Image (spheres, rainbow, N blue to C red):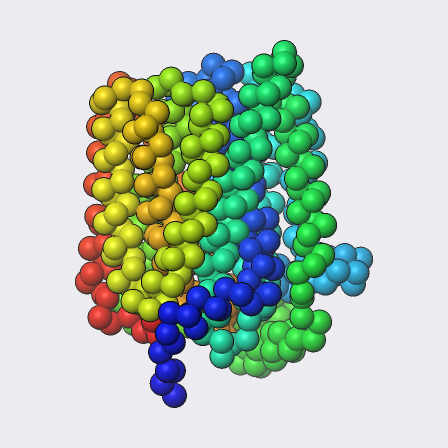
Amino acid sequence: MIEKKQNWIQTISVYRDIRMLRILLLGAISGFPWVLIASSLSLWLKEEGLSRSTIGWAGLIFGVYAFNYLWAPIIDRIHIPLLAKKIGHRRGWIVLMQTTILLCLTIWSLINPTLNFTLLISVGLIIAIASATQDITIDALRIEQIHENEGKTMAAGAAMAVVGWWTGYKLGGVISLLTAEYFDKIGIVDYWQATFLILGAVIILMNIGLMFVYEPVVTDREAKQKATDKIISEKLGSSSFLNNIAAFITGTIVGPIISFFKRNGIQIAVGILGFVFLFKIGEAFLGRMSIVFYKEIGFSKAQIGIYSKGFGWITTVVFTLIGGIMAMRAGTIKTIFYAGGLMALTNLLFAILAWTGKSELLFAIAVIADDITAAFATVAFVAFISLLVDRTYTATQYALLASIGTAGRTTLASSSGALVDWLNGDWGTFFILTTIMVIPSLICLWIIKNKIKIGV
């Protein structure tokens, strides 16, 4: 059946659905940990005197996000004792991971980063693992808020998830930077350690809000999983422990992968994976080193917090919602091309800032422009991979595609600090290279754009 195209008022009214608020909170819970292991950790290490290369390589802890699909089936099947019965399967996992992050922040608040660098990074790795794990169940819970036949609502939900993620990341960054600045000015020596305790309080508030997110009680997911396992086990032969293990692995991990390639064909599937992997590498290189660049060029923590986090959050929210509307009306693929081109051009603004020197006006323009293009790019990207998912394997395939996208942003971008050092601190050239990095992904998408089997 061909869906009748909505007018502008009808499209915008989708955002009034109460479920959008729930999805907004889920996105915020997902985005907040990135404040801890991205900007806060990077600036903490910078102010403790560690090198750019060390800060960049410390970002390797983000690599776990690239592999969370490996344990996604486990999150789908295993129920956390006590928590699952009290608050539900999905929320139980989220609360467990949030508690883990809270404990890690407590440890960070007690250590000296230069004397306990290995412990610091190990705790950061645990935060990353917990965050990557909760992302699996957050995405699943977000999808389960909306019925399968609500296509426009699902697209709006993708936009709200992005808004929520950036809300958690940006506002969390504001709290982090301004709190650290305040503690520093009043004479607290270990001001970052004290800041992490404040961030822990934010996590507690998020868990309280989570209790208002509806989780469906009745589901046939487990029955279907067991039915699939039984079919595979019968094909493998006599029932045994090893056969049951093989059936579990085949049905939950190999099955979704085979489905993806079968649905798209090998050539198109490879093109899709190439695009997904490459699309945000340039943005990640810039983002990983941006706060170090801001500090080196002479901006204070308060200025970084206001322009990069405060104003950035406002522009991100507004233009993510606009990006969602554009994706629903103009098409997801066309929106990706627009966003990719703008993302490349925006990186040039940072090169100009590097060449001209400290300018608060140019800094504000560059940061706000970057937030606008990042908002468009992210919502289009989330909508794109959501449309690619076979709903038979929604959680695992979404985790797989999201992980591949994260792999490009985390593993390769970890060399960003080393690249700046190799360029002898030539930030202008560095930002030019981040502009060029956008192009390969758009080439991949251009080659396959007319053959991709998606509805929007």
Q: In this view, does 115 lie to the left or right of 10?
A: right
Residue displayed at 80% across by 57% down: 82
On the image, the x and y values in percent for residue 86 come to 79, 60
Residue 430 placement (x, y as % from top left): 26, 29
Q: Which residue lies furthest to the front in this view?
A: 9
**Viewer can see residue 270:** no
Q: How many marks?
A: 0
Question: Which image quarter: residue 195?
Answer: top right
The quarter of the rendered structure image containing the N terminus is bottom left
Q: Is residue 441 above or below residue 391?
A: above
User: In the image, what residue occupies the spot 47% across and 53% down?
Assistant: 162
Location of residue 93 with respect to 198 vertically, above or below: below
Residue closer to the observer: 290 or 112:
290
Residue 77 shown left or right of residue 434 in the figure: right
> In screen coordinates, is 65 left or right of 98?
left
Picture quarter with the C terminus = bottom left
Between residue 277 and residue 102, name the one nearer to us. 102
Q: Which residue is drawn at 37% across and 74% down?
A: 7
Query: Which residue is drawn at the image coordinates 20% and 55% (left, top)?
Result: 443
Q: What x and y, as percent, mark residue 436? A: 21, 41
Q: Of residues 239 and 386, which is closer to you in this image?
A: 386
Residue 309 seen in the current view: yes
- The image shows residue 421 at horizontal and vertical percentages of 31, 21
